[in-house]
Image: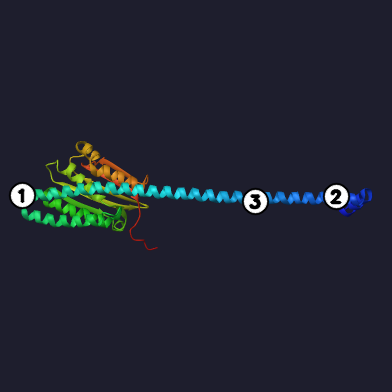
């Protein structure tokens, strides 16, 4: 066993005297102060490092918050621009249909003007919204269809197959009308035969599928006009801005004739579902 500290001190005093002990004490005090100062420096350095880390982290989060804020405003501005492009386009086409009726059938024109006024009211109520419930968008497209049925008569039949559970789901504002208009202008009107446009909406797990189909002239004749038209290109851009990669738009020929556009978006409801 090594000798205790007291024995070491006694031996040191015995061999070196009181002066040696004083020298030893001074050395210990110096080493203690040195060690204490070293601890203080380390503690100060740690606190300073922590303070700098907190400061730079806060600056990083602030820059990140501003970037997200600016990106969000940029996306909203782009969506409003796309919507502003779409609204005058379909309103002009609807009004043009009413003007055509004024030259041929005044009574039918008055009925179409009633539908047009309701269409305009709905368009103004949706002007500041990017998403609406499916039921609201259906009411909008129904007013548009009423104008076109008054103009085309028996040449145009409109059908809906919509699951009731999907009516509260959120969809982009003006989702259906541009697609129905495309089906009419590029599918049914070029044909001399009576035609049909059908809307089919289903809920599939966490997705909502919307399908607009017609039995018109088919994709070969209408493909270029449909793909480059305002309606479909605008819709693709709005879906990409709203949902990113979590959306899908497909345009294809129906085996029985005509064209179908199928859209898939995330399922979200306007009214919270009861547990």
Residue 75 seen from this side: yes
The image quadrant where one finds the C terminus is bottom left
Where residue 143 sits: x, y (%)?
18, 55
Which of pointers 1 and 2 indicates the residue nearer the eye? 2
CB contact under 8 Å: marks 1 and 2: no
Q: Can you identify the residue that label 3 sits on?
A: 44
Which of pointers 1 and 3 indicates the residue nearer the eye? 3
Q: CA distance from mark 1 to mark 2?
A: 120 Å
Secondary structure of the residue carrying tag 2 is helix
**Model colouring:** rainbow
Q: Can you identify the residue that label 2 sits on?
A: 24
**Mark closest to the chain's N terminus, 1 or 2:** 2
Q: Can you identify the residue that label 1 sits on?
A: 104
Secondary structure of the residue carrying tag 1 is helix
Q: Residue at x 66, y 51 (%)?
A: 43
Specify whether 66 is left or right of 50: left
Specify whether 49 is left or right of 177: right
Question: In this view of the protein, which residue sits in the foreground, 9 or 191?
Answer: 9
Secondary structure of the residue carrying tag 3 is helix
Within 10 angstroms of label 2, few (less than 14), some, or many (20 or more) residues? Answer: some
Where residue 175 sits: x, y (%)?
26, 50
Q: CA distance from mark 2 to mark 3?
A: 30 Å
CB contact under 8 Å: marks 1 and 3: no
**Mark closest to the chain's N terminus, 1 or 3:** 3
């Amino acid at each position: 066993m090594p000798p205790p500290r007291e024995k070491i001190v006694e031996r040191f005093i015995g061999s070196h005297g009181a002066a040696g002990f004083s020298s030893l004490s001074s050395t210990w005090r110096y080493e203690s102060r040195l060690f204490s100062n070293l601890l203080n420096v380390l503690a100060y350095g740690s606190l300073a490092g922590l303070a700098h880390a907190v400061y730079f982290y806060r600056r990083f989060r602030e820059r990140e918050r501003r970037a997200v804020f600016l990106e969000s405003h940029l996306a909203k501005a782009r969506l409003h621009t796309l919507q502003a492009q779409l609204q005058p386009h379909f309103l002009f086409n609807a009004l043009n249909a009413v003007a055509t009726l004024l030259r041929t059938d005044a009574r039918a024109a008055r009925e179409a003007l009633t539908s047009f006024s309701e269409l305009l009211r709905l368009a103004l109520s949706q002007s500041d919204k990017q998403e609406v419930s499916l039921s609201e968008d259906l009411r909008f497209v129904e007013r548009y269809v009423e104008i076109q049925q008054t103009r085309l008569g028996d040449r145009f039949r409109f059908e809906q197959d919509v699951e009731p559970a999907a009516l509260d789901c959120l969809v982009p504002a003006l989702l259906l009308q541009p697609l129905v208009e495309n089906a009419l202008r590029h599918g049914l009107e070029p044909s001399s035969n009576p035609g049909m446009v059908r809307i089919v909406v289903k809920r599939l797990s966490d997705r909502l599928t919307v399908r607009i189909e017609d039995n018109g002239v088919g994709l070969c004749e209408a493909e270029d006009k449909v793909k480059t038209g305002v309606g479909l290109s605008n819709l693709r851009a709005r879906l990409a801005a709203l949902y990113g990669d979590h959306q899908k738009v497909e345009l294809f020929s129906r085996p029985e004739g005509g064209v179908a556009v199928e859209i898939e978006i995330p399922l979200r409801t306007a009214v919270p579902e009861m547990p």
